[in-house]
Amino acid sequence: MAAMSEFDRVVTDLLAPHDLRYTAGRRALVSALRAADRPVTLPELLEMSVDLPQSSAYRNLSLLEDAGVVRRLVHGADHAHYELAETLTEHHHHLICNECGLVQDVTLEPRLERTLDSSFAELAADVDFVPTGHIIDIYGLCADCR
């Protein structure tokens, strides 16, 4: 049996409090999400991992989401998009095409992120709210739909 990578250890640790094992099916989903260069829909995931039964994929995505391994993005497209949670990747935002529903990850410069965090903290303090993070979704048209 191959040694477990640090990434797999983190996923295993996220699953443990939910009494979930890192099964082959869950590992295949996480691997497909890790290999994707953007958030993907379930049909796209099933194309990437042809050995996954659809019913099992739906159930496992839901369990992985509950455990904080996967993040589900719902933007009004035909299908939700899925990506690995930021605890496994890095902080980022999304460009979302209004026409085709394509979702692309974008990372802002650290200086801009700090400015946004500071501005959000000031806004939140005005209403006695403590922010714990932010995600910005920018809507428009992708290059193919323009």
Image (cartoon, rainbow, N blue to C red):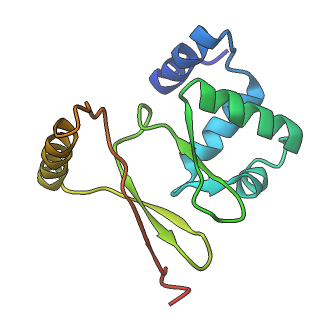
Q: Quadrant of residue 105?
A: bottom left
In the depicted view, which residue is nearer to us: 46 or 103?
A: 103
Coordinates of residue 108 in the picture (x, y in percent): 25, 57
Left or right of 80 in this view: 38: left
Is 105 rendered above or below residue 124? below
Residue 136 vs residue 122, the one in the foreground: 122
Q: Where does the image place residue 87, in percent across and percent down from the top left?
A: 41, 31
**Does 3 appear above or below 142?**
above
Image location (x, y in percent) of residue 15: 60, 17
User: At 73% across and 21% down in the image, what residue appears?
Assistant: 23
Q: Is residue 4 left or right of residue 52?
A: left
Q: Residue furthest front?
A: 127
Q: Could you say which is closer to the camera, residue 116 or residue 59?
A: 116
Residue beneath the point at 66% across and 54% down? 80
Answer left or right for 94 relative to 98: left
Residue furthest out toward the bottom: 146
- Rendered view: 107 above or below 97: above
Look at 51% across and 17% down and name the residue there. Answer: 9
- Residue 53 visible to the viewer: no
Residue 118 visible in the current orientation:
yes
Residue 12 pos. (x, y %): 57, 17
Q: How many marks?
A: 0
Q: Quadrant of the N terminus?
A: top right
At 52% from the left and 57% from the top, the residue drawn is: 38
